[in-house]
Image (spheres, rainbow, N blue to C red):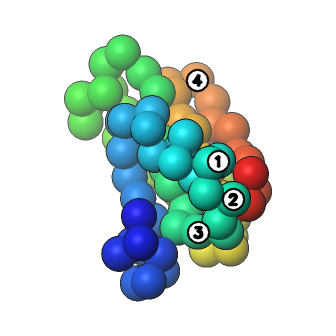
Amino acid sequence: MEWAAARQLVVFTHDLDFGTMLALSHESGPSVLQVRNEDALPEAMVGPVVAALEQHEADLISGALVVVDTHRSRVRILPI
């Protein structure tokens, strides 16, 4: 997380621990895009992930946790 924050990168993960780490840290970065779906294979998630990146680009640049599943995406602005 420190490495990504220092480079202003977005962490892309299926692991729920990254959202928990963000919440506990009270930091404003790095942004995290978290896939929450049983089928996290690229074929199932490419459309929803690309749509979330396009829709929430400004939030991810500013600092956000974006949670994506096959039907929707949710945003929490950092710090949480």
Tell whether label 4 touches label 1 (CB within 8 Å).
no
Tell me where residue 30 appears, x and y as whole percent: 52, 67
Residue named by callout 3: 29
Residue 76 badge: none
Q: Is residue 79 visible?
A: yes
Residue named by callout 2: 26
Kind of element beneath mark 4: loop
Residue named by callout 1: 23
Kind of element beneath mark 2: loop
Query: Quick one: which residue is furthest to the front in this view?
Result: 24
Q: Amino acid at mark 1?
A: Ala
Residue named by callout 4: 71
Label 4, label 2: how far apart the Cα atoms are: 28 Å
Q: Nearer the viewer, mark 4 or mark 2?
A: 2
Which of 51 and 17 lies nearest the eye of the viewer?
A: 17
Quarter placement of the N terminus: bottom left
Q: Is residue 51 visible?
A: no
Quick check: 26 above or below 52?
below
Q: Which of the two labelled residues, at mark 3 and mark 4, occupies the earlier sequence position? A: 3
Kind of element beneath mark 3: loop
Q: Nearer the viewer, mark 1 or mark 3?
A: 1
Answer left or right for 64 relative to 54: right
Q: Residue at x 61, y 74 (%)?
A: 61
Q: Could you say which quadrant of the image residue 27 lies in?
A: bottom right
Q: Amino acid at mark 2?
A: His
Q: Could you say which quadrant of the image residue 19 lies in?
A: top right
Label 1, label 2: how far apart the Cα atoms are: 6 Å
Label 3, label 4: how far apart the Cα atoms are: 26 Å
Tell me where residue 73 appears, x and y as whole percent: 63, 37
